[in-house]
Every structure is written in structure tokens, then in C-alpha cells.
Image (cartoon, coloured by chain):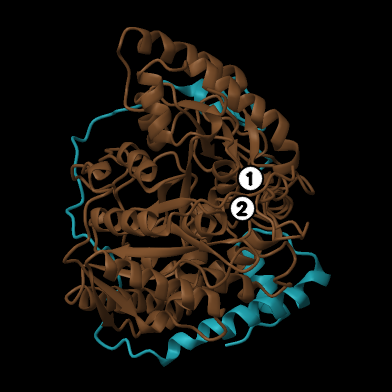
Chain colours: A brown, B cyan
Amino acid sequence: MTNLTQLSLSDAVDGLKAKQFSSKEITQAFLTEIDKSNPHLNAYVVVTADKALKMAEASDAKLAKGQGGTLEGAPLGIKDLFCTAGVRTTACSNILGEFTPTYESTVTQNLWNQGAVMLGKLNMDEFAMGSANETSRFGPPASPWRRKGSNVKLTAGGSSGGSATAVSADLCLAATASDTGGSIRQPAAFTGTVGIKPTYGRASRYGMVAFASSLDQAGPLAKTVKDAALMLEIMCSADPKDSTSLHLPVPEWTKSVGKSVKGMRIGVPKEYRVDGMPEEIEKLWSQGIAWLKAAGATIVDVELPHTKYALPAYYIVAPAEASSNLARYDGIRYGARQSGDGSLTSTYETTRAKGFGAEVQRRLLIGTYVLSAGYYDAYYLRAQKVRSLILRDFELAFEKCDALLTPATPSAAFGYGEKGDDPVAMYLNDIFTVTANLAGLPAIAVPAGVDSQGLPLGLQVIGKALDEEACFKVAGAIEQAAQFTARPSRWW
Amino acid sequence: MSVDKNTVRKVARLARIAVPEERLGPLAGELNGILAWIEQLNEVNVDGVEAMTTPVAMKLPMREDVVTDGNIRDQVLANAPKSEDGFFVVPKVVE
């Protein structure tokens, strides 16, 4: 077997169990590939080679005895947002300095409990704030994808750009990611990978560096819908360490993949047909509708009238919660301290001015402003009420359908710098993904085709609360119909 | 509602971020751009609408009121920029 790194997670897990290859072999194959590729792609910000090989040896010992967990011996990449005991975790921000957690996030612990092997920590936008992964203290990753005949460096999306780069360039079998406004699904769409954000509360937020607590959810980036289901099943759990974690059993989502969509009612919201959307996205969407019809689903037109208010509401709620969450970074208890003139106030102000990048500072100022005396009702409270209206739109739509089909992004991946300096132009990238965060609903992005320049495009399936199963069923049907086999041609 | 340099100075103070004088103007411009876009929300009628809490109604979980953690002083201090004799070292706070 030569191309161990190109296997899907499910095939690799089967191969390990059948002893076709050892965990040490596949882990070493990934480490060699990372050595070669990472200087060009910048997907990993920490490579934990020694730890990976030790974990692989322990897995091989279990596999030899016919024991081991669901992911025994399978090498994964971890977004730098998840605390990993003994391994530097900075959410790609300077303010965390060389922070090395003494504890493990619940999501990653769940993966290690099932025998997964950690290859390292993956690049991301600073504190997950961004849509192009260009706000990382370690510089942006480069997507393995390029436009036909062009050598312009493209973004792999954000904030989980490192995860998307690593999965699409075969630098791990699958990766953890997180999604506050689209940070799993937009990178998935940009790189021809599959990404799902579960219902709010399915995955524990314990040990996940907080951005906006009422929106943040962990989820996987993977090569196939089945792999995404396998990862999500293990990542999710009822966790006493997170009071917003749902105390419900985690379904066996892998069993939903491949189930027929016959008789399902698929809603198509007309509000997702936005001005300036490229014709190719429109075509992709129609194609998706046709595939599902052919597979026996019924298509229903639905209305989500408050869609246009989702992004403005998000840019109140997310910065407001961030300004509160990020107040903890004061340079006193952990992270990089700057002393300024030596006084306490100057220590705080200088630490935060030097430690936070421009986009994070901008959002903290917005958040502080909208929460400041006299403005709370006009901004934050109003935005939270608009959220209720957005959720109500979905609930009314779901009276007529079982899942919604939309494009995942308003365009294919763009080049660094092509969006200009207008923060709002960058924010508009999340126009199709942010509604599911505001309403707390599960949503999956699945590759469905390529544009005329050869870049991947994705479709999104949004499910009812707790109905990840519908997302997996519909995404599985799209995957099967699309037969997406495009691969980035190797330039690195 | 638009912000001026003085408002940015005040908000930066509240957020404990040192902003140099020459950045106040440009930042006011950026924040106004974002705030003007956010103002769209004023079109929405929110009379009688409750603020969003969660899509899945759930009782807040309760647990026994007992100590579940502790005696990990060295772990707590492990990432401190400055510590001494088991304490955080901080700038002088009382003159």
C-alpha cells in the first residue's frame, strides 16, 4: 500500500483493524508528508511528531490484541482552538504567548479515548475571527487549490483554514474545527471537503478557547460524509463540565449516511438567492435540487424573511460576547505580558494592544461599544430578539419540509488581498452559513462541483434542531450524485 | 448613532486596549462603517418578541454542591508570566 495518506478515515480505520498496515506506518507517512508540505502550505502551527509516534505505538499494541477504540491508530489534526494538555495552544493569537494547557478539551479527550493519534495543531484565524485565515499570528495557510493556469495563492477559508488545508492536502485523515458563523462550512466549501456544525450544545465547549459562547460549536472537517459522521459521533457528548452541553444520547450518525432520501421534503429558501451571486452558484444549487428530486425527494419552496438581518445581528452578538470572553486576557495569569509604564492599567492596555491583532481589536471595540451603558437595549437585546425571529422563520419553514438546501458560500475561494480592506465585504462571506449559528441548528457543507476555473463549490443542508440525521442523509445523497473526484494538482 | 474620536478613546479605555492618538480617527471610520451596516436591524419590528435563548429547551443541569477540583497550585501557575513562591507576581496595585 503506497498512498496511506490518501485514504478516507473510514477506510484507514478498517485497514488498521484488519492489520493491513500499522498505526506507526500511517502516522509516519503523514509526518513525512507534513515535513515536505507544511513549509509551503502552513497548515500546522505545531507538529507533535514524538507524541504522535508514541500514541501510534500504544495503538498498535492494542490493535495487535484485537482491542482498541473506534478510531484506534488513526492520525488526526487538531485546530489550535482546542486545549491539548502539554501542547502549546494559542488560538493563533500572540496574546497567548507560549500557553501550554495543563488540561485537555472534552472534544479532543473523546477522540483520544477512542484511540485517535494527534499529529499536531492546525492554523486558524486569531481567536477564530475571520473568513480567510489571514488574521493568524503564524501567517495564513495556502490552499492546495489554485485556479486553472494561475499561481495566485488562494485562501482555504476561515476560520478553520488550517484544518481545511490539512484535510484537502492529505496531511491528516480528518481534523477538528469550530464554527461560530461558518468557520467549518465555508472552509469545507472552499476546499472540496465535508464539514458539519451540529446543533448548539451537542459538542462540549469545555477546553475550547471561547469566541462567542452562544454561537460556538465544534465539528469535524473530513474527506467524506461518512467520515464526518464518524468524527462527529465521537466528538459529541453530554459533558458535566459545560452547562450548555445537551444531556441527550448521541445518535449513531454513521448509520444515516447512505439512507435513502425518498419521500423527504427539501425546502428551498428564495431569500438565499442574493444580489451579485455568480451564475455558477445558482447553477450548482439547481443541480443539487435536481439530484435530490431524482433520488425521490420532494422540493418545497419556503420563506425565511429575516435572512437579510442575520449578518448584522451576528456582528452585534458575536463581538459583544467576544468582548466579554476575551476580557480574561490581561497578561497576569497566563499569556504574554507587556508592562507598559509599569502600572496595572498600563500593563493591561499594553498587553492587549500588543497581543491582539487588528481584526480582534476591531471586534472587541465594537463589542464593548454595543454593550456600553445606554446601548445594551438598542444593540445587543435587539439583536437577540432578531435571533428569535430568525429561529421562528426556520421553525415555520420546517413545518413544510424536513431539511433545507442552500449554497454553502456566495463564491468560490478567493485570493489573499482580493477582498480589499473593507471588513464588511469580508463579513458577507458568511451570509449563507451564519443563520444556522444564530438559530443553533445543525448544518453541513458538502462538495458538489467545480467552477469554470476548477475550484470546488459546496452545497449546504440545514436540519431541524437535533436532526443531524437529516443533514447526513441529504448530504450523503448529494455526495453520491455529485461523484466529486476533483483533486488539487500538486504545485507545492 | 455614529462614533467620534472621543468615543473611540472611551471605548478603548473600557476594553483596556491602548490605542495611539493617530489611530483614533481611522478606527472611528472603520467602526462607523460597521455600525452603519448594523443599523439595518432598526427596520425590524421586535415588539413582543422574546430574546433568543436556545433552540432546544433544556433545564439547567444541577449537581451536588461539593468540591470537585483543587490542590493543583502548580498547574494553575504553570503558565504565569511571573510567579514566585506559589503566587502570581503582579504590578503594584496600591500606591
Residue at (37%, 48%) from the top-left corner?
A: A225
**Chain of the residue where label 1 is placed in the rendered structure:** A
The x and y percentages for residue A274 are 49, 83
User: Please, what secondary structure does the residue beneath circle 2 have?
Assistant: loop
Vertical arrangement, residue A446 with respect to residue A432, above or below: above
- For the C terminus of chain A, the image quarter is top right
**C-alpha separation, residue under disc 2 versus residue under disc 1:** 7 Å
Residue sitting nearer the eye, B6 or A162? A162
Q: Residue furthest right?
A: B22
Helix, strand or loop at mark 1: loop
Name the kind of residue labelled 2 in the image. Asp
| Place of residue A480 in the rendered image (x, y in percent of width and height, measured from the top left) | 36, 54
Instruction: Say which mark, if any, is on residue A125.
Output: 2
Q: In this view, does A49 lie above or below A327?
A: above
Could you tell which of marks 2 and 1 lies nearer the N-terminus? 1
Q: Which residue is drawn at 59% across and 20% down?
A: A28
Question: Disc number at residue A92?
Answer: 1
Quick check: A122 left or right of A460?
Answer: right
Residue A241 spot, x, y in % from top left: 32, 38
Check disc 1 and give the amino acid type: Cys
Classify 10 Å Cα crowding around label 2: few (below 14), some (14-19), many (20 and above): many
Residue found at x 47% / y 17%: A21
Instruction: Tell me, yes or no, whether the two marked residues, 2 and 1, touch with CB atoms within 8 Å.
Output: yes
Examine the rendering and report whether any part of residue B70 can be seen. Answer: no
